[in-house]
Image: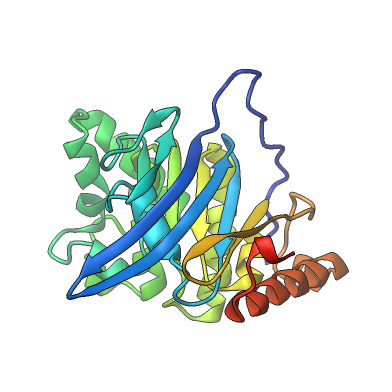
Amino acid sequence: MEKTAEKTVPKNPPGRLPALEVEGLHKVYDGHGRRVEAIRDLTFSVQRGELVCVVGPSGAGKTTLLRCIAGLLDSTRGEVRLDGQRVTGPPPGMAVVFQEYGRSLFPWMTVQQNVERPLIEKGLGKQERRRLVQEAVNAVGLGDSLAAHPWQLSGGMQQRVAIARAVAYEPSVLLMDEPFAAVDAQTRADLEDLVRSLWQRLGVTVLFVTHDIDEAIYLGQRVLVLSNRPTVVLEDVTVDLPDQRDQLQTRSAPRFGQLRGHVYELIQKAKQGYRPEER
C-alpha cells in the first residue's frame, strides 16, 4: 500500500474558535405514541484541521448525530456551531458524504455534471466550476472519467465521485457517514488512504462516522466512542500513532492493536449499558 505523507495539523491560534462545536446535544423522536430518546447529552469539539472518527454500538445514534450536525435534522436541545456560528440548517461551509453513494449521485448526469452541481448552486462562474471539478476528479483518480455516468462505474468509483463532489465544494468541515460500508475490503483500504491523502493535502476538518473500529483507528487522530442509546460520549480516545500511516505496517503495529482492543472493550461495555457516570 502507498504510504500517506506526513503532516502536522496546525493548532488553533490563541482565541480562535474550533471548527466544529457540539454542546449539550439532545434528540428525542416523538411519534405514533412512542417517545424515543436517541441522544441524551453530547458535548465535544473538533479543532480546525483535525480528523476525528466516531464509533459506537449499532443504534447508538451515530447517523442521528451526523444529521443534526449537518443541519438536516433539528435537535431537541443543545446546539451545533460551525466556525462559531450556530447551525440551524445545512450550512454553506459544510459538505456530507453518505454511505448510499448510489442514491446521492444523479444517474442521468455525467461525473462532471454530478461534481459540478453543488458549485452551480453555490453561484460560481463556469470557468471556476470547471477548474474545481477537474482538480477534484484528478485528486480522486477519476480524471479520465468525466464523461462517464455513475451506472458505468464500479461502487468504489461511484464513491470517489461522491468524495470529489464534496471536495470540489471546498468545505471547511467534511462529514462522512459510514462512506465505505458498502464496498469490498480492498476498495475500502484504497478509499481510506484516499481520504487521509486528501485531508493532509487540503487541510479540511473531517468528522468520520464508522462502525469499523480498525478503520476509525487507522484514519483518526481521535476516536469518539459513543455509549448505547440514549447516547453520551463514553470516551474521547487519542490515537497516538505516527501521522505517516500504511495499511500493512500501521495495522500490524503493537500500539494499533492496543488501541483497537481498548475501543473494542469500550463498545462491549456500552452494549451492556455501561455509562461514564458509573466509572
Q: Residue 29's x, y, as percent?
A: 28, 64
What residue appears at the point 61 percent right and 68 percent down from the top-left corner? Answer: 215
User: As displayed, is residue 141 above or below residue 189?
Assistant: above
Q: Visible in this render: residue 97?
A: no
* 23, 70: nearer the viewer: 23
Q: Residue 225's x, y, as percent?
A: 61, 63
User: As displayed, is residue 64 above or below residue 36?
Assistant: above
What residue appears at the point 57 percent right and 21 percent down from the top-left corner? Answer: 16
What residue appears at the point 37 percent right and 41 percent down from the top-left corner? Answer: 94
Which residue ends up furthest to the top in the rendered image? 15
Q: Quadrant of the N terminus?
A: bottom right
Q: Residue 52's x, y, as percent?
A: 59, 51
Which residue ends up furthest to the left in the rendered image? 108
In the picture, measured across the screen, residue 261 lies left or right of residue 183, that is: right
The image quarter in which residue 192 lies: bottom right
In the picture, measured across the screen, residue 251 lies left or right of residue 46, that is: right
* 22, 257: nearer the viewer: 22
The image quarter in which residue 27 lies: bottom left
Give the colour scheme of this rendering.
Answer: rainbow
Q: Visible in this render: residue 240?
A: yes
* 56, 78: nearer the viewer: 78
In the picture, measured across the screen, residue 176 lies left or right of residue 13, that is: left
Which residue ends up furthest to the right in the rendered image? 254
Q: Residue 66's x, y, as percent?
A: 40, 56
What residue appears at the point 67 percent right and 30 percent down from the top-left corner? Answer: 11
The image quarter in which residue 59 lies: bottom left
Q: Quadrant of the C terminus?
A: bottom right
